[in-house]
Amino acid sequence: MTKEALEKAVARLKGGDRAQFDVIYDGTYKVVYFVVHSIVGQKEATEDIVQDAYVTALTRLDSYESDNFLAWLTTIAKRLALNSVKKRSREVATDFAENESAFGTTDPTDGEAAGLIAAAEKLLSPDDFEIVIMCAVAGFKRREVAKIKDMPVSTVTHRYKTALTKLEKYLKGGEADETD
């Protein structure tokens, strides 16, 4: 599809002719797909991001004022792909079956320790437990947790460090101080 034909189809789509979306999609899909795939590298993730790019483009179509729709669309797709890669880089693949005791997935009635998470939940206040889970398990940064919990970063940092100290003392066999 030529650039001029694409721009005419976009103008018609902006004018309310929803049938033009199919024309635009057919004319741009391969380029968008390969741009995203070159960043993400996985077929399923690529397909999801490409779909998100088209949905985003449709919802923001009124803000499109350029003369190069394909560049605008691939920029949207590229940003979504980069965000996806960044998000996946913070994820940690874990085999819960191999590490039952560490993740509290063992049956507490079988005589084994209920796991670190279960101990933390028992030992810490609900807020402190949530902070520890968000920072240590989910991988959030303390400033992100502060924003989510609507607390100062210094408070989150203090509560996180205090909770870790309690857990460390508990794991070393000492009694954790319940008054903290």
Image (cartoon, grey):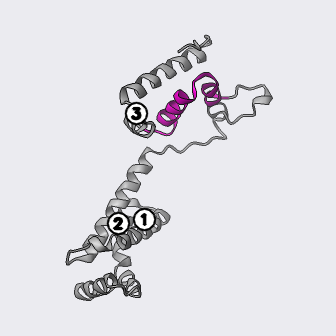
Q: Is residue 41 or residue 158 the one in the foreground?
A: 158
Residue at 79 percent across and 29 percent down: it is: 109
Q: Quadrant of residue 129?
A: top right
Residue at 32 percent across and 74 percent down: it is: 61
- Residue on which the image places disc 2: 77
Q: Earlier in the sequence, mark 1 or mark 3?
A: 1
* Tag nearer the camera, 2 or 3: 3
- Residue type at tag 1: Ile
Q: Quadrant of residue 145?
A: top left
Secondary structure at numbered mark 3: helix
Q: Is residue 36 or residue 50 the one in the foreground?
A: 50
Where does the magenta region start and end? Answer: 115-140
Vertically, is 173 above or below 95?
above
Residue at the farthest right position? 110
By secondary structure, the bulk of the magenta-drawn segment is best described as helix
Residue at the farthest left position? 67
Q: Quadrant of residue 13?
A: bottom left
Q: Calculate the distance from the C-alpha at mark 1 to the C-alpha at mark 2.
A: 7 Å
Q: Is residue 119 magenta?
A: yes
- Residue on which the image places disc 3: 142
Residue 108 numbered mark, or none: none
- Residue type at tag 3: Arg
- Residue type at tag 2: Ala
* Tag nearer the camera, 1 or 3: 3
- Residue on which the image places disc 1: 49
